[in-house]
């Protein structure tokens, strides 16, 4: 072979071409190239006898700072570190150990070492003449970074079998050896280790016979690596199957356990309930439900709801089945008695699929016990009935409509007069229109009576209790909505009881002994800051979280762009429909006043103002002079004067000293504040008028007496609302609470 001959032309070839190996000049040419590189720095890539992979490795070895004449070719690691490596590779070692015995089939009579080498160069397993590598100590790391060019590092780098013969090694100590290595791949085709066969060079290492032996050895090592990889895949697959089997067994056992629990619950339940699949076929029924139907539980199971009752399953419960609603109901007759079938969806473990429906049979009661519909409020308002054109109210309606289709509790927050009860009725009619709408105003009922109103009572529960007992609002709300208005005024001692009812939907009457399961949805409303009440210890935090799962905040009228004038015209038209002959229109000045007054009483206050002016005004239009004095005072306008540039009807006047922003628009008490001939309206005084009233009625007082009188008058005017009374007095709520306690005012 002349100097122009080249190595095997295949890309990334890891072995010497047969024609090159048969050329006696190949070995000397490689030796000369190695000597020129290590002693003179000649680029090995210039020699056609040196494979590119070998030349690249020589260059890297020198970059590592390795001395080609050094005979220490490994790097020591601590026993602890090496043991960690063995632990990581233990499964691979156990697979490889029985397979390396096939080296005997190679027919090698000389010394050899057959070993498993980790990715980092650690020798994991060795078989053969261990003295063949005196320069590599046992439990050391030997890689390209410690020993230079070698077969196992190159095979793992290039991910293919590799031979390194004689002077192809960078280290002079390895020139007497020939090495064959093949990579072992793990998951995702990542090379994790290599099999390495090392043997001494014969007298004629470039003979065709020896080359054939090397190729045979390399092929056999590659086959062994393939067998190891297959065995690893099989073990991983077996482990995966085993884990899947365990998970399946666990899931099956859990499902069986849950099924037994469900069967036991249904079989022992005193409630008339059924479990129905999505196709409307009964899967489980309680004894009470079977008794009502008049058939045995076994006879009912696997029967369709359509066959049992006079209902169409798909039509009656379609909204529940397609996920539009969480609950649905249908009316039916069973053996001459009227029942409601109330269905609740049963979601899958991930909550994304309907697995069945829990159906409860509820008899429509008659006779002595009044029905919920008979004693409940009439929820006639829908979202279409809520008035207003501003984007603020449209946004609140859209949010409430989305919340209505859920089964969660809703808290409505808004000032007095913003329409909280209207929203509550609309939510009810959107979600449970067939059920009762029961409401209770927690601020209007004495604390001692709220408990019996909510929970009901049995006969003889207390003095004055009706014979036969009475169902509470919660019990009567079964299948419908319970509206808790002014929830912030509920006594603290009752909040814990209400919380338990909301958590388990079970109620027991006062004086009763058994709980009754109730299906109802709570909509609560308040104009108070419940967060502050929680911090002050007057409202339970856990009850707040239970009520405010979904929250709708209603904007005050002053924050609803254009709605003040809209309501003024609406109520004017309403008055004309009731009693024709009054004013027909509103002057531009009056319109500006409607738009810019703060209307702290919101829609209720503006309705009061329009009605009052409509029946008092004799002309065809409502003008600025027709407004009550307390409204005009907010703009520094005196009735009878003509509005000019000095009178600004677009913004309220400055706030009185010692007051807040609300003082400027607070209604006043004097009679002249009413429109002539209009109805007497209870209007609120300013702080200055409170003091004037005290002075006029009591004469000279001591400071303490004047303070006590002012507090009593403010509380009376504010109907015992501490926040409003503190505003009238120009002091904080905390100060007023302290004064009330100091003077013993309850």
Image: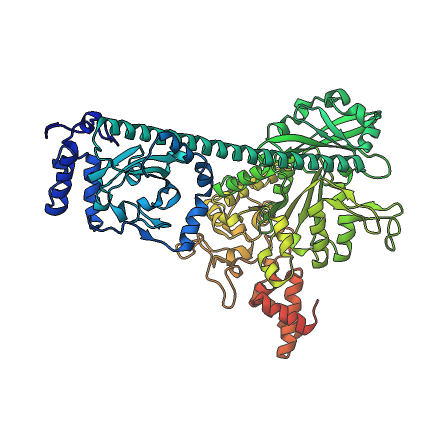
Identified at 53% across, 49% down, the residue is 556
Residue at 77% over, 40% down: 375
Q: Position of residue 40 (x, y in %)?
A: 10, 46
Depicted 692 relative to depicted 263: above or below:
below
Q: Position of residue 672 (x, y in %)?
A: 59, 58
Q: Nearer the viewer, residue 535 or 710?
A: 535
Q: Quadrant of the N terminus?
A: top left
Tag count:
0
Residue 143: percent from the left, percent from the top? 30, 45
Q: Quadrant of residue 324?
A: top right
At 24% from the left edge and 35% from the top edge, which residue is drawn? 202
Q: Quadrant of residue 172?
A: top left
Compared to 112, does 13 lie above or below?
Answer: above
Foreground: 2 or 302? 2
The C terminus appears in which quarter of the rendering? bottom right
Q: Is residue 213 left or right of residue 632?
A: left
Left or right, 172 with respect to 334, comes to left
Farthest residue, direction bottom = 702
């Amino acid at each position: 072979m002349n100097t122009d001959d080249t190595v095997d032309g295949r890309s990334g070839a890891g072995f010497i071409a047969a024609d090159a190996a048969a050329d006696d000049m190949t070995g000397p040419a490689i030796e000369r190239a190695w000597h020129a590189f290590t002693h003179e720095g000649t680029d090995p890539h210039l020699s056609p006898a040196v494979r590119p992979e070998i030349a690249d490795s020589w260059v890297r070895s020198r970059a590592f700072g390795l001395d080609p004449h050094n005979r220490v070719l490994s790097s020591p690691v601590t026993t602890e570190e090496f043991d960690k490596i063995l632990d990581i590779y233990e499964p691979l070692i156990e697979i490889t150990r029985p397979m390396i015995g096939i080296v005997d089939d190679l027919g090698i009579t000389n010394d050899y070492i057959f070993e498993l080498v980790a990715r980092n160069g650690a020798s994991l397993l060795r078989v053969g003449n261990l003295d063949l590598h005196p320069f590599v100590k046992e439990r050391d790391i030997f890689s390209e970074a410690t020993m230079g060019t070698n077969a196992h590092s190159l095979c793992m780098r290039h991910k293919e079998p590799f031979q390194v013969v004689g002077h192809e090694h960078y280290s002079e100590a390895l020139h007497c050896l020939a090495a064959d290595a093949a990579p072992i791949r793990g998951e995702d085709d990542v090379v994790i280790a290599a099999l390495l066969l090392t043997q001494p060079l014969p007298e004629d290492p470039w003979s065709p016979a020896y080359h054939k032996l090397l190729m045979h050895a390399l092929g056999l090592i590659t086959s062994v690596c393939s067998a190891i990889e297959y065995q690893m895949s099989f073990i991983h697959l077996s482990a995966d199957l085993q884990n899947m089997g365990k998970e399946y067994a666990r899931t099956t056992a859990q499902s069986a356990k849950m099924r037994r629990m469900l069967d036991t619950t249904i079989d022992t339940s005193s409630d008339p309930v059924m479990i129905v699949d999505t196709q409307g076929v009964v899967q489980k029924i309680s004894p009470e439900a079977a008794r009502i139907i008049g058939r045995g539980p076994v006879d009912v199971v696997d029967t369709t709801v359509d066959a049992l009752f006079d209902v169409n399953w798909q039509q009656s419960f379609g909204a529940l089945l397609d996920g539009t609603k969480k609950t649905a109901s249908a009316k039916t007759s069973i053996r001459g008695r009227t029942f409601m079938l109330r269905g609740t969806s049963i979601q899958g473990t991930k909550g994304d699929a309907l697995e069945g429906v829990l159906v409860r049979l509820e008899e429509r009661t008659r006779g002595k016990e009044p029905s919920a519909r008979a004693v409940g409020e009439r929820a006639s308002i829908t979202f279409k009935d809520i008035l207003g054109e501003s984007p603020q109210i449209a946004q609140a309606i859209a949010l409430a409509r989305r919340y209505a289709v859920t089964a969660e509790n809703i808290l409505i927050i808004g000032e007095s007069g913003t329409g909280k009860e209207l929203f509550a009725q609309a939510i009810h009619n959107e979600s449970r229109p067939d059920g009762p709408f029961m409401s209770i105003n927690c601020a209007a009922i004495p604390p001692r009576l709220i408990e019996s109103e909510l929970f009901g009572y049995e006969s003889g529960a207390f003095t004055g209790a009706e014979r036969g007992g009475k169902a509470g609002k919660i019990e009567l709300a079964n299948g419908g909505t319970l509206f808790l208005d002014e929830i912030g005024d509920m006594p603290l001692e009752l909040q814990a009881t209400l919380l338990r009812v909301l958590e388990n939907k079970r109620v027991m009457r006062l004086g009763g002994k058994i709980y009754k399961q109730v299906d109802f949805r709570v909509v609560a409303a308040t104009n108070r800051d419940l967060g502050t009440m929680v911090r002050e210890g007057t409202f339970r935090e856990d009850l707040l979280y239970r009520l405010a799962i979904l929250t709708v905040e209603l904007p005050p009228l002053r924050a609803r762009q254009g709605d003040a004038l809209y309501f003024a015209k609406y109520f004017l038209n309403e008055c004309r429909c009731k009693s024709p002959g009054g004013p027909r229109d509103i002057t531009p000045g009056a319109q500006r006043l409607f738009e810019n007054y703060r209307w702290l009483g919101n829609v209720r206050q503006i309705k009061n103002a329009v009605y009052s002016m409509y029946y008092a005004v004799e002309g065809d239009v409502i003008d600025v002079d027709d407004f009550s004095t307390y409204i005009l005072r907010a703009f520094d306008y005196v009735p009878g004067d003509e509005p000019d540039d000095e009178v600004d009807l677009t913004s309220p006047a400055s706030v009185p000293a010692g007051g807040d922003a609300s003082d400027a628009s607070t209604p006043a008490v004097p009679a002249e504040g009413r429109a002539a001939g209009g109805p007497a309206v209870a209007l609120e005084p300013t702080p200055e008028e409170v003091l004037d009233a005290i002075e006029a009625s009591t004469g000279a007082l001591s400071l303490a007496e004047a303070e006590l009188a002012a507090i009593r008058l403010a509380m009376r005017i504010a109907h015992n609302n501490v926040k409003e009374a503190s505003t009238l007095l120009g002091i904080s709520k905390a100060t007023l609470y302290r004064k009330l306690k100091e003077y013993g005012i309850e």
